[in-house]
Amino acid sequence: MSEAVFFSEPNHQGKSKALSPGRYVLAEDFNDTISSVRVPAGWTVTLFDGRDFDGEMVELTSDAPSLDGRIND
């Protein structure tokens, strides 16, 4: 897998968006909707609550079937 995949629902369900390494501001149609993430082996995915890479931050080094209790949606 060469992309991290973000899902709108827990357990890697719902609408998805795959992204290669980089720094992204998600479009309005996917912003504040992420509920689970698939993380490629050896990668770290960093999520921010704020649009300008600020606010609460979560670093993931493995798949997250649910972001509940962290930075969900």
Image: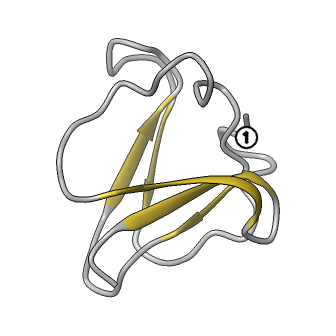
State the residue at coordinates (48%, 78%).
62
Residue sitting nearer the eye, 1 or 62? 1
Toward which corner of the image does residue 29 lie, by quadrant? top right
Q: Residue 10 appears at what percent x and percent y?
A: 82, 61
Toward which corner of the image does residue 6 lie, by quadrant? bottom right
Kind of residue indicated by mark 1: Asn
Query: Label 1 neighbourhood size at 10 Å, few (<14), some (14-19), many (20+)?
Result: some
**Farthest residue, direction left:** 22
Q: Residue 50 appears at what percent x and percent y?
A: 47, 16
Quadrant of the frame with the N terminus: bottom left
State the residue at coordinates (73%, 49%).
35
State the residue at coordinates (33%, 12%).
52
Label 1 residue SS:
loop
Tell me how the rendering is colored.
secondary structure
| Residue hosting label 1 | 72
- Is 42 situated left or right of 45 in this image? left
